[in-house]
Image: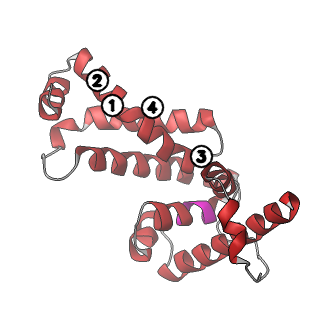
Amino acid sequence: MTEKDLIEGCIRENRECQQEIFSRYAGKMLAVCHRYSRHHMEAEDILQDAFIKVFDNLGKFQFKGSFEGWIRRIVINTALKHYDRKRFTHEQIGLEVTPDQHNDPTVYSHLQSEDLMRLIAALPEGYKLVFNLYAIEGYSHKEIAEMLGIQESTSRSQLVKARKMLQAQIQKMQKIAV
């Protein structure tokens, strides 16, 4: 079945088509959810909420551009809304100050992707959101500012602080490994 056939089947509320769409994209989208959550159960909750929105809004998909990209956008927006709801009960954006570090380029050569994802996940919420949106998803600081309701300069500042914090953690890992 083609992607278009599956989408049209979902619009007609065909359960097999819905299951197939979920099966095709859930794994990739769960990885996206993990980047915006603190633990696996939270990521699964975000994924579930996002796919409800996907199925509710399939009639709005205009077959222009990538269907996967359309789903990813919904997943990211759902994750950001989830963050907004819990934001006031957790840490606020930009409270930490990180010291300047001199970086040894050899430190990065031994880093595994799982290690890096774990370090990103451990960043304070605001840093993690901006880092993911900018460095991984490719949004501009202007777009991030609009999404999060912050100033562009705050987005830039959060990215710099996130990078410094990641660099410090990577260097700490390297010292432990030696």
What residue is disc 3 on? 37
Q: Circle 2 sits on which residue?
A: 20
Q: Which is more N-terminal, label 1 or label 3? A: 1
Circle 3 SS class: loop
Q: Are marks 2 and 1 in contact (CB under 8 Å)?
A: yes
Residue for point 40% across, 45% down? 75
Mark carried by residue 24: 1
Q: Earlier in the sequence, mark 2 or mark 3?
A: 2
**Viewer-side residue, 41 vs 6:** 6
Mark yes or no: residue 105 visible: yes
Q: Reading the chain from its start, which is encountered first: label 4 or label 2?
A: 2
Whole-number angstrom distance, CA of label 4 to CA of label 1? 14 Å
Q: CA distance from mark 2 to mark 1?
A: 6 Å
Above or below residue 111? Residue 102 is below
Identify the secondary structure beneath mark 1: helix
| Label 4 Cα neighbours within 10 Å, binned few <14 / some 14-19 / many ≥20 | some
